[in-house]
Amino acid sequence: MKRWSYIFKEIVSYVLMIVVVFGVVKLTNTYIAAQVKVDGRSMDYSLQDGQRLIVSKFSEPERFDIVVVPAPEDPERLYVKRLVGMPGDELLFIGDRLIINGVETVEPYLAQKQGETVGNFTRDFTLVEATGSVVVPEGMIFVLGDNRQNSLDSRDFGFLPLDDVFGVAKFSVWPFSTFGKLPDYDLDGTGHIQEH
């Protein structure tokens, strides 16, 4: 009888352990972090098709972060894009130059792909032309793919709600050659984006 009691306790203990582990994984995926797979080439060469990323769900999205957002035409689908315009920003592209709030900004994450292009890598546009608005409205963001000639982004579908950001990409976990923390970029006072 003691043997059956011991076996029963072991089974219950394993079941409880599985339930706890499943619960922790579920809570982590829902509130803390999740894994997403890059689908397509719109972020070449910063990211590659099939690359797997860990996104933070509690990080506040900032300008130049790689963010994961619901696709406007199908909220079940996720897009991976670069956050270029924050609420209140005025931005435009002229002659392959990003100008944010009147300051010309150099985008280092575009250098490799841009070097393969003859002519403008990013077609000229103003925020008004792309969205009908002079500035990014409160509570909204403007996103672009790093592969500017092959990206469906805010130039096509307009602003996205900041609150709808699924997460901020922080780490690459696959393929192993890309394993590690993704670069963080910040705009300095001279219009240069610094990696830190």
Image: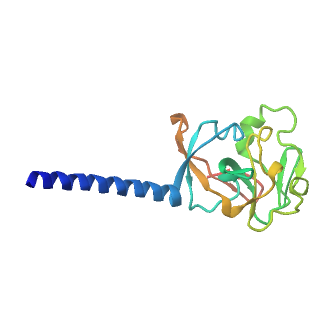
Question: In terms of depth relative to the viewer, which is nearer, 23 or 189?
Answer: 23
Q: Is residue 18 left or right of residue 11?
A: right
Asked if residue 150 is positioned above or below residue 169 in the image, the reply reads: above
Question: In terms of depth relative to the viewer, which is nearer, 196 or 163?
Answer: 163
- Count of marks, rendered view: 0
What percent of the width, then of the height, locates residue 168? 61, 54
Whether residue 66 is visible here, answered yes or no, is: no
Quadrant including the N terminus: bottom left
Q: Is residue 18 left or right of residue 83?
A: left
Asked where in the image residue 39 lies, by quadrant, the reply is: top right
Q: Is residue 32 left or right of residue 158?
A: left
What percent of the width, then of the height, locates residue 131? 86, 56
Q: Is residue 59 left or right of residue 113?
A: left
At horizontal 30% and vertical 57% (from top left) the residue drawn is 16
At horizontal 91% and vertical 53% (from top left) the residue drawn is 129
Asked if residue 111 is positioned above or below residue 56 in the image, the reply reads: above
Q: Residue furthest front?
A: 1
At horizontal 53% and vertical 52% (from top left) the residue drawn is 34
What percent of the width, then of the height, locates residue 189? 75, 60
